[in-house]
Every structure is written in structure tokens, then in C-alpha cells.
Image (tube, grey):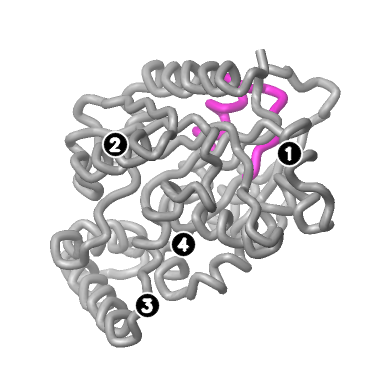
Amino acid sequence: MSKAVAEAESLMLGFTKLSHQVYVQETDPNLQDPSHPTTIVIYGWGDARPRHLAKYVDGYRQLFPHAGIVLIFSPILKALYQTLEARSRTMVPVIEAVHPEALNKQDTKEKTANNQRVLLHVMSNTGGMNCAATMNAFSKHTGGEIFAHDMLVCDSTPGSTHFLPNVGPWSRAMALGAARWFPWPFVVTQTLAALFLGCLHGFGWLLGATSAAEFSTLAVNDARLADPGAKRLYLYSKEDDIIHWEDIEKHAADARHKGWSVTAELFEGTPHVGHMRAHPDQYWAAISAAWTEAVVNKGRQ
């Protein structure tokens, strides 16, 4: 058995596989705390491995021990080459796990308002692409309804969608996930990644298509797709070498201007999606405090 397979099996112990990217771990609904989430949806960062995301599952288990957890893996290459329609179909299992009534053509608004308390945790831009695709898929299946949630955590995301200023950080992120597969120096892998991204960008420009990154960045601040009553928490660092902190603050300000309740938590000296590892107490305290505000704002306490 390979190390990767062993890691996957270890993490997925107790999880049910819904697809190659989506896993779910359910708990007894009779044990759920009415002040806690009923479901936590974790959108992993690009090419995150099971052993990385296991630490976040453990952290949420300590905060909210009886919440169900939906875990989404996010291969960077797949997120980049898929069309929005294909990516949205890939995220339908998330809807099945969180809001199955939407696919059963039941009264979605009544069901979600009374029974569900949903926390979405999005990591990096690739996780954001899959979160936005989930929202888009939900809207398509329900004739325009919103994927209801009580809180959205944006961990090291979203960044700028402009190609030239970001091709360096994007290619580096892509190369980090792929480097273990190639024997040559890292700079060669990053160069190939940059060329690949350049080709994708060029084809998209010729076709007049909206990039996955651009769609996702706009979608989470679009009240037609993202729940306007949800609490928003941004977790970021000025030392992030993939996503610029100014872009995150700009997105947070836009969300606040459009009516979302926004909190931003700044971490000192942490790399991209590295805030929890370096400052676990600050990290989980920020999430706990924001969730408490979320349920108070919706009158659930």
C-alpha cells in the first residue's frame, strides 16, 4: 500500500465517499447542540493532501463535536481546466450532503431555515472555486435559490484575478502541489506551470470566457448566490506569498459595503494557509467567536 493511499484511508476512517473529491462524516442528530453548526463544509486548498486537512477536521471536532463534516479535495489542475458547468456538476454531492431537499424538489427555504446551521470553510482560491461552483449548482437546481449557510470562513482567500501580476504566485502554488512528481529543480516545474497558465489564460481571452478565479471571487459577494445573512470571517497574513493581503482586505471591504457582517483576523508571520499551524489558539478562537456572532445575528440563541 502506498503512503498516499494509507494517508487517505486513515483520514477517511469514519467518512463516507460521495465522489472522488467529496467525503462526508455524519453524526447522530439527536446529540447536536442547537448553538453549534449542524454541518461544517471544508473546501481544501489546491492539492492539499489528507494528512493536511485532517488537522482541520480535528480542530472542528474539538469546537463542535456533534456537527457533520463534509470534506472537499481540490486538485488545482482540475479546477483550472474544468468549465463552470463541469465544476458545478462535480459539487452536486456537496448539495446532497448539506441540503438534500434541494435535489428532491422540496421547500428548500423552509427546510434550511428550520433545520440547518451550516458553516462553510474555504481555503485558498482553489477551495473558493469549488465553493462558488457549489453555490452555482444549487442555484441551477433550485431555480435561483441561495445555498443557505450561517457563516463563511475565507482562509487565505480570495486574491486578485488579474493574470500578469499573479502568474508568479499562481504558478508557484501549482508547482508546490506537483513538485513531488518530477525529478528536476523546482524552478523548472514552476516555469512549466506558468506556461500552462498562460495558455489557459490565452484560450480564455480568445473565447471571452470568465476565469474560474474571477467567477468565484465575484460569486461569494453576490447576494444572488451567497447567503446575505451569513457571517463572514477572513483569516489572512501580510506574509502570504500566494495571495496578497491587500486583495483580501479589498474583498472584505466590498462584502461589508454590500451588507455582510464581516470580521477580519490578521495573523503575524504566517505563510499561505499556514495560520492554523502557527497560531492554533488565535485561529480557533476567531472561528468560535465569529460563529457565536453568526447564531446571535440569526436569532438562534
Image coordinates for residue 156, horizontal then vertical, percent? 33, 41
- Give the Cα distance between marks 4 and 2: 29 Å
| Figure check: 178 above or below 281 | below
Name which of mark 3 and mark 4 comes first in the sequence: 4
Where disc 2 sits, the SS reads: helix
- Left or right: 201 in relation to 62: left
Does the segment drawn in magenta span residue 271?
no
Which corner quadrant of the image does residue 126 belong to? bottom left
Q: Residue beneath label 2, please?
A: 253
Circle 2 or circle 3, nearest the eye? 2
Name which of mark 1 and mark 2 comes first in the sequence: 1
- Give the Cα distance between marks 1 and 2: 28 Å
The residue sitting at 77% across, 32% down in the picture is 115
Residue 127 in sight in this render: no
Q: Residue beneath label 3, please?
A: 209
Q: Residue beneath label 4, please?
A: 75
- The answer to whether the residues at label 3 and label 1 have Cβ atoms under 8 Å apart is no
Where disc 3 sits, the SS reads: loop
Image coordinates for residue 182, horizontal then vertical, percent? 31, 70
- The answer to whether the residues at label 3 and label 4 have Cβ atoms under 8 Å apart is no
Q: Residue beneath label 1, please?
A: 112
The residue sitting at the front extreme is 258
Where disc 4 sits, the SS reads: loop
Which corner quadrant of the image does residue 216 belong to? bottom left
Image coordinates for residue 201, horizontal then vertical, percent? 27, 76
Q: Amino acid at mark 4?
A: Pro
The residue sitting at 37% across, 18% down in the picture is 282
Where disc 1 sits, the SS reads: helix
Name which of mark 4 and mark 2 comes first in the sequence: 4
- The answer to whether the residues at label 4 and label 2 have Cβ atoms under 8 Å apart is no
Residue range (magenta): 54-70
